[in-house]
Image (spheres, grey):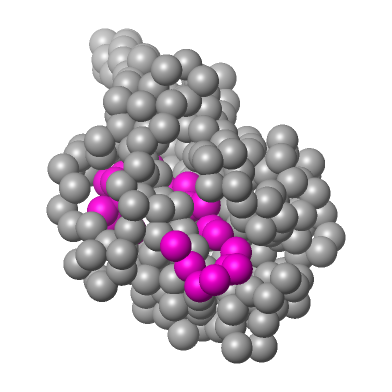
Amino acid sequence: MLLTLATVFALYALLAAYLYVFQTRLAFLPNVPGRALTATPENIGLPFEDVRFDANDGVKVHAWFIPGAPGAATVLICHGNAGNISHRLDLLRLLHELGLGVLLFDYRGYGQSTGAPSESGTYRDARAAWNYLTEEKGIAPDRIILFGESLGGAVAAQLASEVTPGAVILASAFTSAPDLASHHYWYMPVRLLARIHFPTAAYLARVRAPVLIIHSRDDEIVPFSHGEELFRRAPEPKAFLEIRGDHNAGFLLSASTFTEGVRRFLLAHGLLGADGLETR
């Protein structure tokens, strides 16, 4: 019995050590399904600019800029932890159909961006994308909509806690990385082991812009309760949009609900005109 207990304890300790040492590999998945760009906006009929800009530590960030209708607002998309910008063309299409411009960038270590992924690195890269829009493109901050999906929700919320965008949209986002890890690894002391935090809810509480939370009850990765808690923590004005479908395909399965919900939200805050285009 003592030998069995010792073996179980040793295996538990090894698992804990693995989670501590390799959590960066668990959090960031740039090679799933791969770093290669498999398509471009041209594949869905959209003209685009292939751009690169520097983060403040010298990392080269790769992005696509897709112009919107004349005078339209622009969406800065912070994507999730897997894949790259070429895997977000469906989301790009849905947002562009509202007449919005879009800047879609890859974090360091993803796609054609240089460097290696890290929590602080994602924040630096998002700030570089913001600077590109405001300084290079000359877009006013209140004409930029920050959109974060999944892990990107934390990145968008962190950026929004430091700048003042026109609006913030978080889709399928978690309250924090330790909160999410505690759900999936309930048998491990993940809060003690955590070196990656992504405290979305804490950042969101400091945002000074209208907030839209989008979540599905069918989300098998980030529980619906995380979306509810983010909505609770968000400052006014705020709105909640419930969609259906799983974590990765929910916005496609709920395309009409997603598009109409985003349109109504932006229209309510002066970012869209009655015809779906921004008029300010």
Residue found at x 30% / y 25%: 114
Q: Is residue 13 above or below residue 133?
A: above
Position of residue 15 relative to residue 244, above or below, is above
The front one of 13 and 118 is: 118
Q: Which residues are magenta?
A: 67-88
Task: Answer left or right for 253 relative to 230.
Answer: left
Relative placement, left or right, of 50 versus 152 is left
In the displayed structure, 249 sits above or below 63; it is below
**Residue 19 occupies quadrant:** top left
The secondary structure that most of the magenta stretch takes on is loop
- Asked if the magenta segment contains residue 78, the reply would be yes
Q: Residue at x 69, y 49 (%)?
A: 141
Image quadrant assignment for residue 232 = bottom right
Q: Quadrant of the C terminus?
A: bottom right
Report the front residue among 150 and 159: 159
**Quarter of the view holding residue 264:** bottom right
Furthest-right residue in this view: 236
The residue shown at (66%, 88%) is 274
Q: Residue furthest bottom?
A: 275
Q: Which percent across, then down, holds residue 234?
A: 76, 54
Q: Is residue 2 one of those drawn in magenta?
A: no
Looking at the image, residue 155 lies above or below residue 85: above
Q: Could you tell me residue 15's position as x and y percent?
A: 33, 22
Q: Position of residue 98 (x, y in %)?
A: 51, 77
Question: Is residue 8 visible to us here?
Answer: no
Specify the quadrant that holds the N terminus.
Answer: top left
- Count the labels in the image: 0
Residue at coordinates 46% horizontally, 85% vertically from top-left?
256
Q: Is residue 151 visible?
A: yes
Residue 278 % position (x, y): 64, 74
Judge by depth and name the residue closer to the eye, 3 or 102.
Answer: 102
